[in-house]
Amino acid sequence: MQKYLDKKLIVVGNQPEAIQATLDFDYVLGKEKPSILAIIDTNTKVKIFNWGAENITIPVFKNLQELKKVISINEIWGAINFTSSRNVLRVTKQLLDLDIKNIFILAENVAERDTRFLRQLSKEKNINIVGPSSVGVLYGGQLKISHAGGLPENFIREKLFVGGEVAIISKSGGMLNELMSMVTRSVGGIYMAKAIGGDRFPIENLKEAVEKVSKEEGVKMILVLGEVGGTQENELAEYLQKNKINPKVVVHILGGGAKNVEIQFGHAGAMANSDVESVEYKNQILEKAGAVVVKDFANLKKALKEEASKLEINTIEDVTPNRNLPDNFKNLLRTKKVRHTPEILSSFDYNYSQGAKQTMGKILFELWFRRKADKTVGDFMDLVLKTLIDHGPEVSGAINTIITSRAGKDMVSSLASGLLTIGPRFGGAINEAGKNFYRCLEENISPENFVKEMKDKNVYIPGIGHRVKSKTNPDDRVEMFKKYAKKNFISRKFLDFSLNVEKITTAKKDNLILNVDGVVAAIMLDIFTGLKMTNAEILQILNAEGLNALFIYARSAGFIAHYLDQKYLDQPLYRHPEWDVLKI
Amino acid sequence: MAQVKVSEGEIRRVYEKRFGVFPVSILDSKKFVVKVDDTIGGRFKKGLIKVGVTKREAKEFEKELQVKGYKKILTLPYFPHEKEYYFSIESFSDYDLLRLGNVGGVEVEESWDKLSEYRIPIIENWKQDNNIQKIFVEISRNHLTEIQNTNLLLEIYDFYIQNSFSFLEINPFTILQGNFIPLDFKGRIDNMGKSEVTISEVNDKSVSKEEKNIAELDKNTSSSLKFQLLNKDARVWPLIAGGGASIVFYDLINKKFGKKENAFYGEYSGNPTTDLMYEYCKNIFTLLLKSNANNKILVIAGGNANFTYIPNTFKGIIKAIEEIMQELKKQKVLVLVRRGGPNDTEGLKLIKEFLDKNQLENRVYGMETDIVDVFNNI
């Protein structure tokens, strides 16, 4: 009676939920070890599953050849084939070659020719193949193969952990659990419930499934759910007519309402091509062959109960499983039955479909500074980003990128090496300049006092000074930004302040002009003010180094270009010339 | 995912691509055959075929058919002939069955027993198989000896396999000057296999926009979404999960309310995403609202699912209901829910709270209620 309790399975393909449900079924029954020995899949060597409240691992092999080296084929009773319709033929042939005696195929939409070919092979080699389009098989209180029986919530509630004397064979996978519930709730325990799949030509057909289970000890009743279309029920009738089998066969055939209507039901086989495929005909010949034919689904439960009482099948008593499963943490959390403080908090929400319709400048302004930007702001961002992309191969970040690329390193390493030079001396001045300007206006520090203060500290003023450009030879990028701000932005107090600082510094030295960093910082602050950001909001941005995002983002594009350029030119490892190093 | 009927024109196109067109000039035929190129049966009886007409008569009949709404019409040269023959191949679970005989056309209906039958076993490399070779040698020895190409039936069998036919009937065909002339084709292909034969949309004009939309959704997902409109002014609109349960409900609704009140056949399965469910429902609800019936019922039901995650599908349905809430209330649509499966308690609670909050008349059942009791007291 308990001959399936210790049967072991392997699984081909990636279906962690189905595997976990089988392990849960094993655990609830009180098994010492899981019934799944191994998984055939790629990418990993073991997979983690729950075993009650504990965790266990199941070995994963890349293919059956690898598995064979570790696991003896004799230990394997069956294989669950989860591969897709395109791979079913190939994988199932491999399983047949290993002589695994029971194979379950879950894939839907397998070509009829592939299925029929596998059927011939299964007969030649005397191997049971259930499917395609099966949802699996459940041996009540013994073994759960694939999705049949559902998840723990179902198989515990519907008492499928109890064995019994009723077998169910269904073309429909979706109705399999429904029928199991009907039986366990009002008739008795399940011996076996099998979905043979709704295809027109399943590998194991209705008649064969009934024949096999009828020969098993302890089966008193077989409930068969057939369908309109195909001739499998007719073959079953023929078999029942010729052979006396022990269990009582109770049949309902779906689709009786489809008479004279051309409907292709959801199952591939469910459409009557001729009269012999109609429900009426099937009902008639099955009845003649001695089966209890229930014509109306509404009467099925009643009929099952009646037959069960004749056969002395007992209803299931109030039982609990041998072992209880702990609640699933994720389920409890989702249904708010436990509480938990998350470790990660995020207020970031980027809608890519909206993003696709906007300019990069607008998107970045909103992502970085958390305010809706109008077109003028977005375009200013674009302007700045475009100008900041590159400043030649000589600057420190580009040099680093070039050297790293030439050392044979990859894109990310080369880019990172360039980015790591960005800081107080290279490229990091925008945010510093912004901080200074902001402090001055907040604390009413005049440009004169500010310049004096910086001189007293003996530091360069961030955002002021250029190596070559001067008052007489101005930086055209700065001029462009100034022009844009004057044309488009009303609030310009930071720009005015920075220009006043420039007046003082250029009076001292011609090249101490307001540079790109300074002008961008000032205009960005003017934009923030124009958008009526609070002091706290602006400080938050400055303290988080927010203004440097413009430089870092734009220059990354430039560094990538330098990296690629070096790769395209196939430049060798760089070594700095000795004559250029003074050793002291 | 099934066997699908294909039209004569499509079969003929692919057949002629492989076997060539018989040169009409030899016969100098000035007569034609005109027929509606559709998969519907009994075309002769319905007056959709005319045989042996002149060019002018053919044109007139074509126009006549077009006016009636038939888009695809096949006009072929008419071959005057005396003898008609029958040939077909059909797939069965364990073999392919070849039938052939000297009785063709409609007469074959009364003469099935006069046909010779040959069973071809299912073998992957069948061309190399000695047994199958022998069968075809026997066939060509016993039948159609007047055909020049002794390999023809074997080649047609190859054509059958290459194009994933499940059924192919050439009835009738005739033989003229040693040539095999197919006069009519009928067939079904397995639409999961490879085939050059394309599946034509049946009765183009009668398929609703919503059915086309859902067919398109179904095509682009690994889940299954089916919808076939039966009665646009029906009372009962069943959103059913699962191929099997959908037939249960189909039968149940027909019995309880009568066939005319069953709006459509449909099913969703294979764990469709929330978004897909929303799109599926939106199309169906458009038609539901248009129905002229009184006391409409929206059924949201299914059996006890194996792996379809109930709250996700319900969320899609709820989203679609929300959009037509006012209209549903105005029409006083009753919502019946019955479902089991992964996280069913959570899903049922979700939909019950939603329907109650919006004051839509509803009844929500779980696994404690049998499928057949859903319509009690209605």
Image (spheres, rainbow, N blue to C red):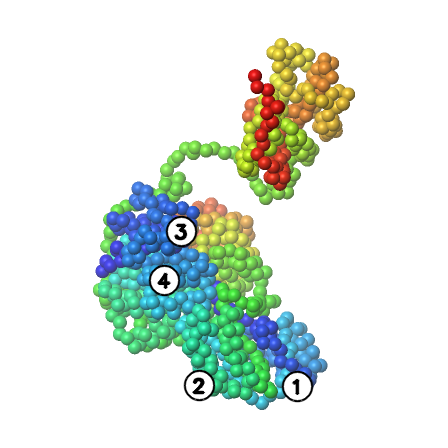
Name the residue at 70% across, 81% down. Answer: B55
Residue drawn at point x = 32 percent, y = 49 percent:
A23
Rounded to the nearest angstrom, the CA distance separating label 2 from label 1 is 34 Å
- Sequence-wise, which precedes: disc 3 or disc 4? 3
Q: Is residue A566 left or right of residue B103?
A: right
Label 2: few (<14), some (14–19) or many (≥20) C-alpha neighbours in 10 Å: few
Q: Please give the residue where the numbered disc 3 appears in the rendered image.
A: A62
Q: What residue is pinned by disc 2? A: B113
Relative to A522, say whether B363 is above or below: below
Decide which of tag 2 and tag 1 comes sooner along the chain: 1
Chain that bears disc 2: B
Circle 3 — which element? Answer: loop
Looking at the rendered structure, whether the residues under marks 3 and 2 are on a common chain is answered as: no
Q: Secondary structure at mark 4?
A: helix
Residue A295 position, x and y percent, is 37, 70
Front residue of A429/B346: it is A429
Q: Which residue is mark 4?
A: A97
Displayed quadrant of residue A545: top right
Chain ID at mark 4 = A
Q: Secondary structure at mark 1?
A: loop
> Between marks 1 and 3, how big is the CA–CA gap?
64 Å
Looking at the image, is mark 1 or mark 3 nearer the viewer?
3
Which is nearer the eye, A548 or A27?
A: A548
Residue displayed at 52% across by 63% down: B228
Same chain shared by disc 4 and disc 1: no
Q: How far apart are labels 4 and 1 at the CA level?
A: 57 Å
